[in-house]
Image (cartoon, rainbow, N blue to C red):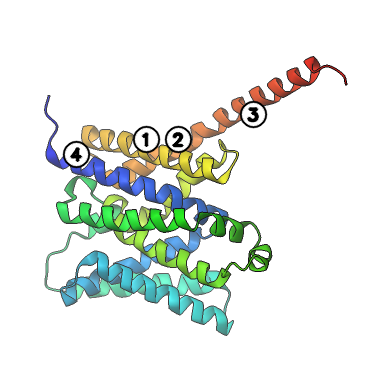
Amino acid sequence: MTIEPFIIKGLLAGVIVALVAGVMGCFVVWRRMAYFGDSLAHSALLGIALGIALGVNHNLSVIMLCSLFALILVWLQQKRIFATDTLLGILAHASLSIGVITISILEQIIDLHSYLFGDILTVGNDQIWWLVVGGGSVLGVLTYNWSSLVLMTIDEDLAQAENVPVARYQMLLMFLMTIVVAISIKIVGILLIASLLIIAPAASRQLSKSPEMMAMIACLIGVISVVIGMYFSFELDTPSGPTIVAALAALFVISFPISRITTKKMRTFLSQNEETRPLS
């Protein structure tokens, strides 16, 4: 039995995105940045439209536009005109609307459905290259700054006392999220990127006892969901992005009884040890 090259490329792309989103998503969940990630994804459509209009690589144009989005958000936050969620809603929907209008004006034939919901089975060599370079860079930066980022997430005041540049790391997380959004569009689509960053870490949170363990389990859940989603997408002829997210949601539901069983066994083990421990 031979496996078609496009299936191998799609599986490789999905695994890379699952690994990157699993680690990055932990900070999204911890720092409650889910709405920010969703807003970044919405603004990505405008980046794609500008990339098509200017003849620039889509991934590069999305990174540039999303970075500009993050800078504008920070600037507006400092003005304290509106609450952050209000600003995110305004910027996200304005960017999405302008992106749709720009694409409709362009004379080129564009598969808008693949951008909105993803099409992992059409991933090419250039996209694989972007995933390897971009995803590897994100994982490398997160790993190198892991302790400082976790400390900042737990307690910003304590991080500042330890001479951790909190503001710089906050901007770093935003920039890394723009890269994740840019390289994930082809896999799950603009409308589903936030789910990839949220569901796997949320499921792993039920099963982990430390930040590092949570990140590793999130990656594992993401990879499993990609494999299951691709299989059913190919067999049932369904959109790849939504099918992967549906697999993620199923694993999230399964994580609850597993976490309860694990917790119950741990409590039983500890209570047995207490009973058998000799008195000093």
Q: Which residue is under mark 2?
A: 251
Mark 4, Cα crowd under 10 Å, few <14 / some 14-19 / many 20+, is few
How far apart are the alpha carbons under marks 3 and 2?
Answer: 18 Å
Answer with left or right where residue 162 lies relative to residue 229.
right
Which secondary structure, mark 3? helix
The residue under label 4 is 8
Q: Is residue 239 visible?
A: no
Name the residue carrying label 3: 263
Q: Nearer the viewer, mark 3 or mark 2?
A: 3
Q: Kindly check if marks 2 and 1 are in contact, taking CB atoms under 8 A apart as contact.
A: yes
| Residue 206 percent location from the top left of the image | 57, 38
Q: In the picture, residue 193 is in which quadrant?
A: bottom left
Q: Earlier in the sequence, mark 3 or mark 2?
A: 2
Label 1 residue SS: helix
Secondary structure at numbered mark 2:
helix
Amino acid under disc 4: Ile
Q: CA distance from mark 3 to mark 4?
A: 38 Å
Mark 3 or mark 1: which comes first in sequence? 1
Q: Identify the mark nearer the N-term, 3 or 4.
A: 4
Looking at the image, do the residues carrying marks 3 and 1 touch, with CB atoms under 8 Å apart? no
State the residue position of label 1: 224
Q: CA distance from mark 1 to mark 4?
A: 15 Å
| Residue type beneath disc 2 | Leu
